[in-house]
Amino acid sequence: MTTELIVAGFGGQGVLLFGKFLALSGLKEGKEVVWIPSYGPEMRGGTCNCTVVVSEDPIGSPIIDSPNTVVVMNKPSLAKFGPRVSPDGLLLINSSLIDTTSDRTDIRIETVPANDIALELGNGKAANMVALGAYVALTKVVKFDTILDVVKENFAKKKEFLDLNIRAVKKGYELAS
Amino acid sequence: MAKVLMKGNEALAEGAIRAGCKLFFGYPITPQSEIPEYLSRRLPEVGGCYLQAESEVAASNMLYGAAGVGERVFTSSSSPGISLMAEGLSYIAGAQLPVVVLNMVRGGPGLGGILPAQSDYLQATKGLGHGDFRLLVLAPSTVQEAADLIVDAFDLADKYRNPVMILGDGMLGQMMEPVEFKDRPKSKDLPPKTWAATGLVPGKKKSIINSLYLDPLELEANSWELKAKYDAMARDELRWEQFNCEGEYDVLIVAYGSMARICKTTIELLKKRGVSVGLFRPITVFPYPYKQLSDAAQKAKMVFCVEMSTGQMLDDVKIALEGSRPIHFYGRTGGIVPSPEEVLRQVERIRNGEEVDKVWER
Amino acid sequence: MGKVVFKRPKSLADVPTHYCPGCPHGIVHRIIAQCIDDLGIQQRTVGIAPVGCSVLAYNYFNCDFFEASHGRAPAVATGAKRARPDLIIFAYQGDGDLASIGTAEIVHACNRGEKITVIFINNTVYGMTGGQMAPTTMPGQVTTTTPYGRDVNSIGWPIRVCELLSSLKTEAFIARVSMHSAREIVNAEKVIKKAFELQIANRCFTFVEVLSSCSTNWGMTPVEAQKWIEKEMVPYYPLGVFKSPNGDESKN
Ligand SMILES: Cc1ncc(C[n+]2csc(CCOP(=O)(O)OP(=O)(O)O)c2C)c(N)n1
């Protein structure tokens, strides 16, 4: 089983961290993982994305034309990556910032109001963690406990954000389960 | 040690430290700045020295100094910076000093771009700088392999008293993968550095670190001495990987570094369609595994060289095959990385007797 | 920002720049373009862009331009000026470009008295590559390659380029201005114009250092960054005219 993911949004929405946490969780479960960011002049202010592959087998290409899962956090990302989801794949849309959807019928489309939920929890910045929780619930690529551990470990030094982010992944997970 | 998730750049930097290197001289440049940034934090922790040089010209000459007094020393840069280091590297090779240099290649020529490319292959393998010299060049294709090869690179540099280059590309540097730093016993059979200029103490011969030979016979002797080292490397240090080459295949892909791992996925995709294609991946690109490639190619009807350049390693593939098999080439460059599906479409075309799709002509 | 840009100089291209919000590169570009307009030299001016954040400066000016390799702009300028002395040549360089990798080129261009104008943007960091240490980084300043702060015992003190170049005997115009307030920006325009006038008169090598900021890599708001220039940089990098062929030096 190989899960390929492109997660995309504005710079500053935390999509790289979303991807990194997924990769760390895969690693924790003894799987093969690779994470690769888009890098370059477009990084500042513009759109930003990363690709993550989690697999039971050794991973070849980190460059994926048609990933089997895509998470889009803003509208330009939907336009860019929506068409690239592989048939039968999953497209997860952040409905707080995207009021449209994809017209594709050959894929599964899910939504999560990630920013709204994060704001309810006290800080819009945690939208990426809400989306991550939902993503894990929908794909089951890693166990929920694993992702929770990764969040805890990575925010251990930033105590002021720890609780917020834990609640954010939990909420995202519950909503999508 | 447990596996940790690291960027290729960081793994290489940590690998250098694990290899006992305590000295880094360099100059910031994308896409390898994580290396100096990592080492500026990490080297002081192990009592080492990180120094940001005023330029790559200066950095390469700082390497000359540090290597000349017998210490393990490392630098990393990317294409335009490596061109500036050509001066120091030529002196280092001429004076027969061990150093490790990393090139995280970006698109060129000139200022080019900052995205991954393989367009410095000829520069790296055919003598980087003036004079009759070569670097030993290793081309990793995963983060783990990068972390392992850089440790070997220091040993090989010491063994041959020659600069060793790790040839990566922006993708390898930016990519995160699990890495394990293996505790390796220190190589015992490395010769002591009696040649180092560490002071004329009683019982020691005077050391002169030098590449100047005004007597043509002496200069010629030095050049043949270098050549003998390169021949020894070609005999003893060749490394390569074959993938899906056990059974039958009618196409053999030849690719190195990041491009090779992309081709592995192409091969897996082709397998699902019942098409068997082999991959030959040189790991040492100087010296080049000519014979091994030629042997692997004999099972195939045709050879397909894929690069992120307009055709540089292609020259070595031609040398290896000596006209014995038709060679097809597909290259994207300037920072464009071909996807597995893109390569697959080309394999299908050449199997059908068509030419590769020249997408770049659009 | 202090000064109202009431009208775009015709030597400035009407395109959005890639600079971060609050970056002074845009202001300095406008000042230079205004001088080119005022002096009526647009048709014979050739600019030289460096490697650094202003690498794309050739897109932002309406005049001919080169893009030089890292640090070599004064050498490129020398070549162009020696080949075509009738042209007005200006090089635009950052502190990494000019005071690190290009130290030799700037010192020798100045020492030969090349009749060119060099605008030197000192923002204390390597902006483009992500905020590494520059030769002008302040003592103790944290950058991505000085995680423990710049240690002057190990890498020396920040280089004061104006003072260094002023020590050369060859006649030259050498001045330092700042971007930290509206008043200083108005003054910067006067000084830069003066430099171009001296080049037009074929008088001497002309050099203007501009104390600037990089709020992105400093991790500050543009307003905090302006204050930081005034409080931290100006005391170490005094403003004024360090050397002038007219003997009208003025330091403050
Ligand atoms: C030979 C070479 N080495 C390194 C680089 C990478 N590089 C690009 S811009 C830059 C630093 C520019 O800093 P500065 O001159 O201070 O200008 P700023 O970006 O702050 O405006 C470096 C090191 C390069 N392009 N060429």
Image (spheres, coloured by chain):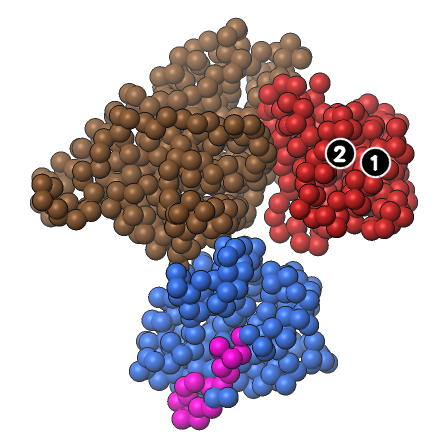
Chain colours: A red, B brown, C blue
Looking at numbered disc 1 in the image, what kind of residue is underneath it? Answer: Lys
Residue B8 coordinates in the image, percent (x, y): 53, 37
Q: Nearer the viewer, residue C43 or B262?
A: B262
Which residue occupies 86% across, 37% down? A171
Residue C118 coordinates in the image, percent (x, y): 46, 74
Residue A82 coordinates in the image, percent (x, y): 80, 36
Which residue occupies 46% across, 86% down? C241
Which of the image's four quarters has the N terminus of chain C?
bottom right
Q: CA distance from mark 2 to mark 1?
A: 8 Å
Chain letter belonging to callout 2: A
Chain letter belonging to callout 1: A
Q: From the viewer's perspective, tell me whether residue C248 is left or right of residue B126.
A: right
Q: Is residue B261 above or below residue C173?
A: above
- Residue on which the image places disc 2: A148
Q: Nearer the viewer, residue B278 or A21?
A: A21
Q: From the viewer's perspective, tell me whether residue B67 is left or right of residue C162.
A: left
Q: Secondary structure at mark 1?
A: helix
Q: Are marks 2 and 1 in contact (CB under 8 Å)?
A: yes
Q: Nearer the viewer, residue B263 or B156?
A: B156
Q: Are marks 2 and 1 on the same chain?
A: yes
Going from N to C along the chain, the mark reached first, 2 or 1, is 2
Neighbour tally class for label 2: few under 14, some 14-19, many 20 plus, Cα within 10 Å = some
Q: Secondary structure at mark 2?
A: helix
Taking the image as drawn, is residue A148 in sight?
yes
- Residue on which the image places disc 1: A170
Quadrant in the picture for residue B139: top left
Q: Residue furthest top?
A: B247
Residue B88 coordinates in the image, percent (x, y): 30, 49
Which residue occupies 72% across, 25% down? A3
Residues in magenta, as a range = C233-250
